[in-house]
Image: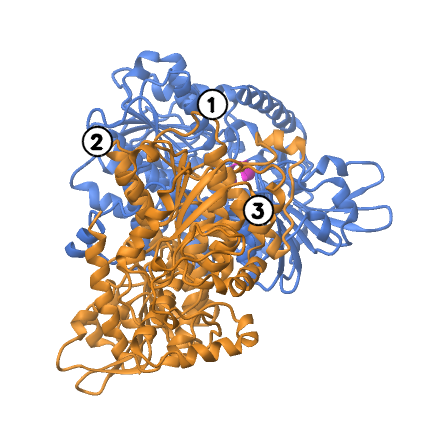
Chain colours: A orange, B blue
Amino acid sequence: MSDPTGDAKLELKQASKEVKESENVAEKFSAMTVSKNSEMNMGELSTVFSAVPTHKPVKKQIQFVEDKQEFSRFPTKTGRRSLSRSISQSSTDSYSSAASYTDSSDDETSPRDKTQINSKGSSDFCVKNIKQAEFGRREIEIAEQDMSALISLRKRAQSEKPLAGAKIVGCTHITAQTAVLIETLVALGAQCRWTACNIYSTQNEVAAALSETGVAVFAWKGESEDDFWWCIDRCVNTEGWQPNMILDDGGDLTHWMYKKYPNVFKKIRGIVEESVTGVHRLYQLSKAGKLCVPAMNVNDSVTKQKFDNLYCCRESILDGLKRTTDVMFGGKQVVVCGYGEVGKGCCAALKALGAIVYITEIDPICALQACMDGFRVVKLNEVIRQVDVIITCTGNKNVVTRDQLDRMKNGSIVCNMGHSNTEIDVASLRTPELTWERVRSQVDHVIWPDGKRVILLAEGRLLNLSCSTVPTFVLSITATTQALALIELYNAPEGRYKQDVYLLPKKMDEYVASLHLATFDAHLTELTDEQAKYLGLNKNGPFKPNYYRY
Amino acid sequence: MSVQVVAAKMAEVELKDVLTGKDLPAESPVTPTSEGKNLIRNDPHEAGSSAATSPTAEPSAKAGEGSLGLLTPNTAKMPQGSAMKRTDPQQNGGEAFVNRDGTVAEAPRMKKQIQFADQKQEFNKRPSKIGRRSLSRSISQSSTDSYSSAASYTDSSDDETSPRDKQQKNSKGNGDFCIKNIKQADFGRREIEIAEQEMPALMALRKRAQGEKPLAGAKVVGCTHITAQTAVLMETLSALGAQCRWAACNIYSTQNEVAAALAEGGFSVFAWKGESEDDFWWCIDRCVNVEGWQPNMILDDGGDLTHWIYKKYPNMFKKIKGIVEESVTGVHRLYQLSKAGKLCVPAMNVNDSVTKQKFDNLYCCRESILDGLKRTTDVMFGGKQVVVCGYGEVGKGCCAALKAMGSIVYVTEIDPICALQACMDGFRLVKLNEVIRQVDIVITCTGNKNVVVRENLDRMKNGCIVCNMGHSNTEIDVASLRTPELTWERVRSQVDHVIWPDGKRIVLLAEGRLLNLSCSTVPTFVLSITATTQALALIELYNAPEGRYKQDVYLLPKKMDEYVASLHLPTFDAHLTELTDEQAKYLGLNKNGPFKPNYYRY
């Protein structure tokens, strides 16, 4: 539990430094949100463009883009995402069409100092501008179309109201997708108070739309560190309302309640935590014997894991490389470092495009899998001189070192799909004899004295977060998992969950998957009674033992 | 243990069948083509089998030389063959052999051969999926496969004396074994040597561990199939310092010549092909019950040996240091014992090791689905519409292979998670009824029963191929096809045309039994994975410090699992990367593994 304040300050500084480097404001700006909107909101877009002359708002845009993607793509793989990982530069992507319709910079007053009232006369919220609610509503409606699983969950469970009486306090990114989640929870009977888990990621118009419907939201884009904790506190500390469920992403809210309101914390019926960091903090708490409520780790559910890693990376590796370098894959020699879920995804995609793929691996079991899947397992040094593309996905550090970078051939591309920015030893490239040339945003040519160029993407940070987008489908998986975890914890009979951290029950995991099958027009077969009896299974699952590997 | 009882009963029935069969004069309607083929190929196995009919070892040695020297194409094929040892009557060449056995599946005498082929393959392919393999699953008919090259060089029928009544001594004067014919040792040795070449992992293990002799003092009593591959395992154990006594876990699967070679090499082996039920238990007892020698380790496959010692020699059982069990059945029996609180020694379940599971299911089925279908039907896969029922490991393997061949693949699934995986892998998820009218091939791999029922079969289109890759023979409701209005026509061994009154034909493979066991072969590589896992499990149990393993059933430690994998990497010329100290520290791992947490899914 490192001091978050220090972290955040440092980042803010770095972030503003980066702004000065940034060249192409318009390009930076465009990265996010949903494309369908861009046309109908052209007017809004142009105001945004005109509003960007200063560096400060640009920086905000950049951050927003990055954070948003992080949330979308890989909510789990980053250390304290919300505050610690913002040293990145803007996304370069000039193809994705959407933008945030609102710009926080048009109003310099802090939301904390404004009193706003929604149309029903309630003022129990704190957002940038309640007037943007209509916009936000449209955003949410678009997201709803892509999150059919949550919508069908609403329909299926609406009559039973499985969350009736639940008072949920939540701390997640506030985007159109989470808004769909929040409104689903409300539709299932819960009362919600919400705050942002990231100071940059909030979509102001969505926050406004939520406030307008009566959800107490405390969040705006570009909060200060102080604002951040103030929002969390406003969320929790309200008269006549005591939360009984926590939905957290990163563990900040849990931490705050645990520290500041131990009495409220004790009465919580359950915590649902989404991120690796938050889960880690919960396990620590549990180990120390201080966790006095049951918690659910939804990060490690089978469905979520497969989508976060295997399926997502399979798509984003091609997307990220194409957007940044326009490389053609057929016949290219590619070395992928690591053959875990991410590596498996990358290799499958590259192989399908006709690339010649080599693997490096430390784990003999994964290495054998690579062999059986038809990939040559090599040591990096054996192929470093001949490959055109190097992709790291090990989760390790210094997998590609200066020594190896020195030996690469002219024009080879180096990028990282793994964990944080440690895999490629980028620092070793910051020496006087090498010239760095930024050819596009997120694309650097590093030039050796002899003229050799190595193309470094995203300065060794995660390619999939920096240079690619994330399908709403993946967010839908996450949100559905969270909703089901809340329902499970809230409705579990006394004693099923003790004061410990639990994995999502297999049955719920299967239910998440089944809710998403409709998207594929997939028709699940049902067991007959006779077959169920033969297999010794319940007709409705769970279908596999816990140790099943999928 | 009701399974066992049933199994035993079934075995009795079968044995009766076989015995009565023996008395019948077996006709041999061998097709001239197959004979001709064998003659032209001058198959070494033909030479082998004819040699076996002569009582002396010398000519057999000659024949062996001939085969090695003259027939390069066949020697090239030999390794593959030795993995299989499928007694295929059409294949086995020698007229005498064929005459004795007959080729037509319906001939009762065939049963034995058939049984053997099937059983053996079971061992190779999927030792784990069948209930008491050794005795319970023998209702099958012969394998059809005329391409696989190997055969057993010896035929049990050439000598009617039971090995139990013969006194034999090996060249060192030792008589502590009981096998068919010690004179076949030379042959067996060659078999073993061939197998050694394909089991580099065990050979590497020998080399790496020979200096330390990690099994010095271990007295291993084993009960497995006795084939060239297990012989390599046994000799490895011996090279590592263990003393071994061995019996067969299957009454049909023993390679007599290999048993002879082992006996000649000083192993106390009690096994021959075609044991009776009584012989089976007698062999096990001879293995265990010997003066001045008490086993301290058990290597079992099926749980029969463990059961015998547990029941008959409880005092000996208590002193065992560890049990290594390979099959699902055996593991199930161990868990039952453990649940009842009666397991007083630590046991290792090697069946569920990651490496073994992946190879038994995913990788093996990925290859054998194409092989099995091609051999039986010569179907072309490109553009064919195939429905695969079930998307577990087996289903994933089948789908991957079929997709690669250009088939249009549909999947049916009951588990939404696997269903979502199928969707994301690009397969249409359907209910069987939605596509049954249009598909060309139906493959079941669910482990369930009655997945394809008569109603589905009625609606299939003409020429549709139906086969089962899953578990036992319950998935396709074959019984429902045995009605008067349908005509069955056997077009090849393992291939039946079922003809509807309107002339529609369905091609049913292996009568709904496992296609991969009945109509395809298993690479030695897979056997090597299994054998290496067993050897490492023995070493681990034997050398574990007091208290690491309690009286329970354990999974193979992840580190050992990784070691098995690493021993097989040289086959692929794969070069594993090593962590630097700095990297290991960063990840919080030991440089030598284990590299993944236990819940990792691979």
Chain of the residue under the numbered disc 3 shown in the image: A
Residue B56 drawn at (x, y percent): 43, 37
Q: Is residue B493 left or right of residue A144?
A: right
Question: Are the residues flagged by discs 1 and 2 in contact, CB closer than 8 Å?
Answer: no
How many dots with numbers?
A: 3
Q: Residue furthest bottom?
A: A451
- Is residue A437 one of those drawn in magenta? no
What span is in magenta? B116-121
Dot 2: element: helix
Dot 1: element: helix
Residue hosting label 3: A514
Between marks 3 and 1 in the image, the one whose residue lies nearer the viewer: 3
Residue hosting label 2: B543
**Is residue B308 visible from the viewing direction of this image?**
yes
Q: Which is more toward the observer, A116 or A453?
A: A116
Residue hosting label 1: B280
Q: In the image, what residue type sits under mark 2?
A: Asn
Q: Quadrant of residue B96?
A: top right
Residue B373 drawn at (x, y percent): 61, 53
Dominant SS in magenta = helix
Chain of the residue under the numbered disc 1 shown in the image: B
Crowdedness near tag 3: few (<14), some (14–19) or many (≥20) residues, C-alpha within 10 Å: many
